[in-house]
Image (cartoon, rainbow, N blue to C red):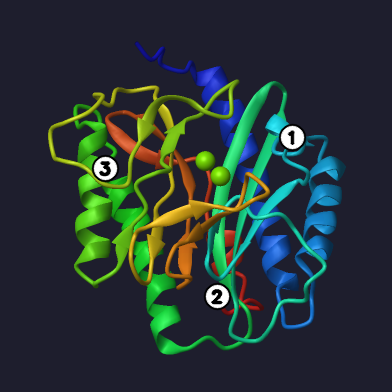
Amino acid sequence: MVRPKTEEEIELLRINGDLVSRTLAEVGKMVAPGVTTAKLNEMAETFIRDHGAVPSFKGFEGFPAALCMSVNDVVVHGFPSERPLEEGDIVSVDCGTLYKGYNGDSAYTFPVGEVDSETRKLLDVTKASLYKGIEAAVAGNRTGDIGYAVQSYAESFGFSVVRELEGHGLGKEMHEDPGIPNYGRRGHGARLQNGMVICIEPMICAGGRGVYLAKNGWAVHTSDHRNAAHYELTVVVRHGKAEQLSTFDYIEKDGSIKF
Ligand code: MG
Ligand code: MG
């Protein structure tokens, strides 16, 4: 059984959601050809700590950095590196915070400079599939309704859905029940109820859905080495509806950034 969050807990999760959202926007301002993901990671860690929070990924099961930086065929859990980003790359940035005992968790895939039209479509469709999932995150629905919404949308464009990784509940722990798969059948899975805080995070591949784990034990690559995108938001089911606790508005509504 999942214990619904109290209003006080939801407020702390909202503060964390706001901080991860603003951190991703800070990263987005700096994403450009020639910049290293190590540099972006360093800047983000400083930003998070300056706001009195801790980067929750750092040290989690031995993960070495504040952010996951997953470039091109890396779906998730990439390490920041000294390889400069290149025009036409995409970089999926996953950010977690811990503040006053609660977690924040969101991700965004940024284009580096100009990307080709197929890649642009992958980004747009993956993000739109996330919003389809959020629309389905209403009280009384089940996790399978979210998965179905994400999957049916993404696959209608010929893209594929990673099955090995999924979204999750969020609270004092970074990963809580229930799991939120990005594929599924309507009416199946755990029932959503008011007070549930979940992260929905489609991982969508331009080609096939096969993935493998890199030798470092972390980075998940597409088997065909085609691009994958990853967008994640935290939502609470509240008053029956899905209410976002994190947002891409800081990235997209600031006129200076064109994502
Ligand atoms: Mg995440
Ligand atoms: Mg997550």
* 241, 37: nearer the viewer: 37
Q: Where residue 63 sits: x, y (%)? A: 72, 40
Mark identifier at residue 146? 3
Mark identifier at residue 18? none
Label 3: state its secondary structure: helix
Q: Amino acid at mark 3?
A: Ile
The reply to whether dot 1 and dot 2 touch (C-beta < 8 Å) is no
From the image, state whether disc 2 or disc 3 is nearer to you.
Answer: 3
Real-space Cα separation, disc 3 to disc 1, in angstroms: 31 Å
At x 39% / y 73%, what residue is drawn? Answer: 122
Q: Amino acid at mark 1?
A: Gly
Q: Where residue 250 sits: x, y (%)? A: 61, 61
Nearest to N terminus: mark 2 or mark 3? 3
Instruction: Work out which quarter of the rendered image holds the N terminus and state it.
Output: top left
**Residue 173 falls in which quadrant of the image?**
top right
Image: 189 above or below 29: above
The 10 Å Cα crowd at callout 2, few under 14, some 14 to 19, many 20 or more, is some
Real-space Cα separation, disc 1 to disc 2, in angstroms: 32 Å
Using residue 225 as the reference point, say whether residue 121 is left or right of it: left
Using residue 253 as the reference point, say whether residue 223 is left or right of it: left
Q: Where residue 81 sits: x, y (%)? A: 78, 63
From the image, state whether disc 1 or disc 2 is nearer to you.
Answer: 1
Instruction: Work out which quarter of the rendered image holds the C terminus and state it.
Output: bottom right
Q: Where residue 128 sits: x, y (%)? A: 34, 63
- Which residue has dot 2 on it? 259
Q: Spot the residue most to the front.
A: 215
Q: Amino acid at mark 2?
A: Phe
* 210, 112: nearer the viewer: 210
- Which residue has dot 1 on it? 62
At x 82% / y 67%, what residue is drawn? Answer: 82
